[in-house]
Image (tube, grey):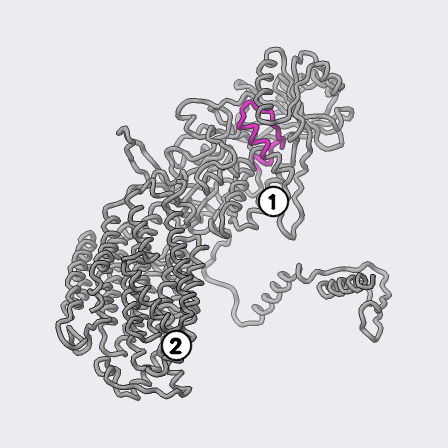
Amino acid sequence: MFAWRGLQRDFRSLRGLLTVTRDAQRCSRLPEGRLGSRRCLRTSARVYIDVIKDLERHLASGARKVADALPGSSWSPIEINPNLPPECADIVIVGGGVVGWSIAYWLKRKERVREALKVVVVERDPTYGRCSTVLSAGGIRQQFSLQENVYLSMVSADFMRNINDYLGVLNEDPVDIQFTQSGYLFLAGEEGAEVMQENHEVQRKAGAKVLLLSPTQLKHKFPWLNTEGVALASYGLENEGWLDPWSLLNAFRRKAVSMGVIPCHGEVTDLKHTTNVMKTSDGEKRTMKRIKSVQVQMPNSLEFQPVDCTIVVNAAGAFSGRLTQMIGVPLPVEPRKRYIYVVHCPGGPGLDSPLLIDSSGIFFRREGLGGNYITGASPTEEEEPDATDLEVDHQFFEDRIWPHLANRVPVFERLKVTGAWAGYYDYNTFDQNAIVGVHPSVCNMYLATGFSGHGLQQSPAVGRAVAELIVDGSFQTLDLSGFDFRRILADKPMLERNIV
Amino acid sequence: MLKILIPTLMLTPTIWFSPLRQAWSATMTYGLLLATMSLLWLKHSSETTWTHMNSYMAVDYISGPLLVLTCWLLPLMILASRGHMSLEPAERQRMFLLLLTTLQALLILAFSATELMMFYLMFEATLIPTLAMITRWGNQAERLNAGTYFLFYTLAGSLPLLVSLMVLQNSTGTLSLLTLSFNHFNLDSTYSNKALWVGCLVALLVKMPLYGVHLWLPKAHVEAPVAGSMILAAVLLKLGGYGMMRITMLLTPLTKDLSYPFIILALWGLIMTASICLRQTDLKSLIAYSSVAHMGLVIAGILTQTTWGYLGALTLMVAHGLTSSALFCLANTNYERTHSRTIILIRGAQLILPLMGTWWLIASLANLALPPLPNLVGELLLIVTLFKWSTWSIILTGAATLITAAYSLYMFLLTQRGPTPPHILALEPTYTREHLLLALHLLPLLLLTLKPELIWN
């Protein structure tokens, strides 16, 4: 008993040594300074200052004082832009979206010795004004028709559930991506029911917990839903939901920077490469290119820095095609504009509302707890909007979305559009699936693009896969060799039937 | 003597006034010719130790092999630099060749000097072309830092050497090596004599380098271009060893006691730097640290002041010069293709460049002192010498041999074997010039395996 008291006193005194308590009011001290017998007449709360946490601040202010006291100034005639990327780097990741930062994080995790790899992430717009990541609806689902896609989403969902184990930084606030777990509800009419059943088989075989519902079960579960015209519905039971993409991006970036990745704010204007004509074993000639350096231009300036690099990772999202054009190699990825409208409907579906995707192509999900919903639709090929800017077409909502929405959820007949934005899909025009792997003609350019709307949800898993490809030489945990660029050359599409 | 030195100096007009392409080929061919002629220095036809004499320069048993190594290295450096120098403007290429030739001439003068003051002057003079090479033609921004470390570490050590040499000149009246061997030195164990001992040796220990003052070496080796790394590893480090062999002759009875801490530091450095090699991520840094390890053994051998110690030191210096230079050339072949020195990015290269894999194998096996290569002969002689000096040293040297084998094999297996990442599948095939370069490095090594008496007598 007394030992415990003594231990408590010791611990308190030790803490007292490590923290400096500054009282708002001066307390009166007894002449003998024995700890424990001091009485203070304090009326305000104690303010603890952790000296160790403040150490860096104290050291910096001390250094500044010394520098001020010493003669001379820190002016130098050569103005060196502190934002310049290093002259050479091992890996340059072009594109600072969630896929780019995910690859950077996983590369740093997989290097076996500290600072083995020098990784630079180049992003041209630090406000992320046109970045697909931050403009996305932020959903994650497992209901894909390709097994690889299901695996990618399952792994990523697991990552996001335990995100602080992966992306938590010591002494900083924990990561909160506001992962709202809720299922996706796909509705299918008569024509689509068979496809939905096949997809369901694939999903179940991959281990995803997805439930098929009949119209009566659907009506029983979601009474606010109008099940007219619905033959079958598919409801995800776990690993699905939506999250805040901006927090995820920042979490990846913060952790990667803390591990030593160098962020650079600049635009890649050129890829200096060498061309080599080589003969295959059959005797035909192939042109192989190798990127020697990346020209990074500083913002609002003519200054540029050529970064000599070993590997370039193309994670530029919607603008990946523009990057490969600099090296003269085609890539079937182009930006496609998609709209998202924020609507307010007081009596709408409550907490149990899933992310509903109708057979007509429209989708909606709950946003927050105030009766706001996010809705959108994938346009058909004919009604593709012009992707030169991010202006929102409100007529699209009136013509294409509202009728189907009101038909499916009768409450939504009376809603008010409170806001809208547009974002890009990095749309793979070949088969709407990711392109992951080395480009066959450019020896050292890795591609991680073409996600066509499901990049955010697959980003942790794809980042790990690309890092494995670079560091280990081949995929270790998930085999994504089906997403290689060669399928485009061989004209064998890996079609994903469940595109939202 | 002069028939090698004057042609080397006359390479200057060759470089400056020939058309550029011929400048490279001519310098390299003449360099090979001079290297062949320098083999005559290995033949000692007279009874005295000194041969090929003139009043300022001479060759004896210790300087002969090192001189041949120096002359051999010039054409190899020129061959190695053709790749990365081809992109530079003409004047800079000529300047580079001029630096290499000047360095060569200064090194010939340094090794063949008969007067210790001349040796000191040439020792200092070699710093300037090397500094210019590192800071001007190095690849990264860190080269400025590397140049500063390189210059000031050596300069800080050599000022005491200058003072000590002046003191010796005053006390003995001459610093000519030809006559100093006949002076019987018997230095008393006073503080000033001990300071003299330390002053004489600290510059050479920094140059070798000894473990505690070795920090300049990884920086300088990594940031230098390939020719700079080659000459640094192969010859400039041996300047320190050669100087120690000469100067300890003048410091006779003191060395027995005062060398104790330096031998211990050298042996400890052997283990420490070998262990550091296992954790390196940069290929050139790994080879640089292995140089420190081998030279630590050489320092320990020289400081024991025994015949076998000197023999082993000389053998290991020559063998290590060739091996380390070969390894730097191999690292450069990787660097020119992928522009990276990181080991984990260039793996499994044997599948793509199989013949280069053969050279990697031979060079790595030489580095880990595989019998019957002269690396092993040198190491064995030194280990036995140290065992005689103290039985306990076998623990350190044995552990170091083990770790040396570990990191040499680690380097070989990581770069050559294992899974090949997709981004190095289409590397340029090996040029004939690179094969020639490595053959010229490793053939003398094999030759020395068959007839080590070439460098012993």
- Tell me the kind of residue under disc 2: Ser
Q: Residue at x 76, y 27 (%)?
A: A350
Task: Say which residue label 2 marks.
Answer: B259
Label 1 and label 2 in one chain:
no
User: Dividing the picture into quarters, in which one does residue A162 lie?
Assistant: top right
User: Dividing the picture into quarters, in which one does residue B123 lie?
Assistant: bottom left
Residue nearer the viewer, B214 or B386: B386
Depth-wise, is mark 1 or mark 2 nearer the camera? 2
**Residue range highlighted in magenta:** A129-155
Residue nearer the viewer, B345 or B7: B345
Q: Position of B34 compared to A1: left or right?
A: left
Identify the element where label 2 is drawn: helix
- Chain at tag 1: A
Task: Say which residue label 1 marks.
Answer: A167
Identify the element where label 1 is drawn: helix
Q: Which mark is residue A243?
A: none
* CA–CA distance in space, label 1 to label 2: 53 Å
